[in-house]
Image (cartoon, rainbow, N blue to C red):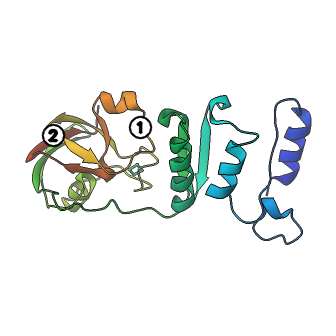
Amino acid sequence: MFRAELDELEARYADRLRIVHVRSRDPRHPAHLRGHVDREKLDRWLGSDLPVGTVDAWFLCGPVEMATDLRDLLLDRGAEPDLVHVELFHGYRQPAVSDDSMSAEVSVQLRGRRHEVSLRAGDTVLDAALKAGLDAPYACLGGACGTCTATVRTGSVQMEQNFALSSADVEAGHVLTCQSRPTTPSVAVDYDA
Ligand code: FES
């Protein structure tokens, strides 16, 4: 797919664009580029052509296991979290439920109206809003797209995983509600901010 377009781009910008094709279903493809883009291949590239410190931004797109595995490796190797962008095109991990997850009363500001919602222990803020019949925004449910972002006004939550918000976003109080469970008995979130 897009092979001709990619070849043309690579030829036109030969001094600054290099494309490496990894193929999973071509037995004649070079052995070291066969299979999937996985931890082993990325680790090899990081140790040769692609040192972490030379890269301005990383864009990882793929199934959740692949994208999160590669992101973990990049962070282990010293990549700045804000420079690693992830798009999950299928599959997502349900946030794990910890033993200390708590029930809470959640006040939800959504499209100009405030709603009071009861959240059951183990549910995320988004779960609680949807169960209460609110039309809260979401898409990937995996912490990658940022569609479910809201701002915490009072109380606090814990995010399970976050591939979408920068550290500045998090410091400003933004959270991914699909990944957020309350850590206080009452929480107020604002989707309109
Ligand atoms: S729905 Fe995509 S990050 Fe929450």
The circle drawn on residue 188 is 2
42 to 36, vertically: above or below: above
At a point 83% along the width and 64% down the height, the residue shown is 31
Q: Is residue 41 left or right of residue 96?
A: right
Residue 97 drawn above or below residue 2: below
Secondary structure under tag 2 reads strand
What residue lies at 77% left-to-right and 58% top-to-bottom? 22
Q: Position of residue 74 (x, y in %)?
A: 56, 44
In which quadrant of the rendered image does the C terminus lie? Answer: top left
Three-letter residue code for mark 2: Ala
Side of 163 where 110 appears, left or right: left
In percent of the image, x 80 and y 54: which residue is there? 21
Q: For the residues marked 2 and 1, what is the alpha-carbon distance in whole angstroms? A: 19 Å
**Residue 82: % across, % down:** 49, 33
Which amino acid, mark 1? Answer: Leu
The residue that mark 1 highlights is: 165
The location of residue 142, given as percent across then percent down, is 42, 55
Taking depth in this image into account, of 25 and 126 the one nearest to the observer is 25
Q: Is residue 182 left or right of residue 55?
A: left
- Can you tell me whether the CB of the residue at mark 2 lies under 8 Å from the nearest atom of ligand 1? no
State the residue lying farthest toward the right: 11
Res. 99 image quadrant: bottom left
Q: Secondary structure at mark 1?
A: loop
Q: Residues within 10 Å of mark 2 (few under 14, many from 20)?
A: many
User: Which badge, 2 or 1, comes first in the chain's sequence?
Assistant: 1
Q: Position of residue 59 (x, y in %)?
A: 61, 42
Quarter of the image containing the N terminus? bottom right
Q: Residues within 10 Å of mark 1 (few under 14, many from 20)?
A: many
Vertical order, 75 against 26 (above or below): above
Which of the two marks, 2 or 1, is nearer to us in this view?
A: 1
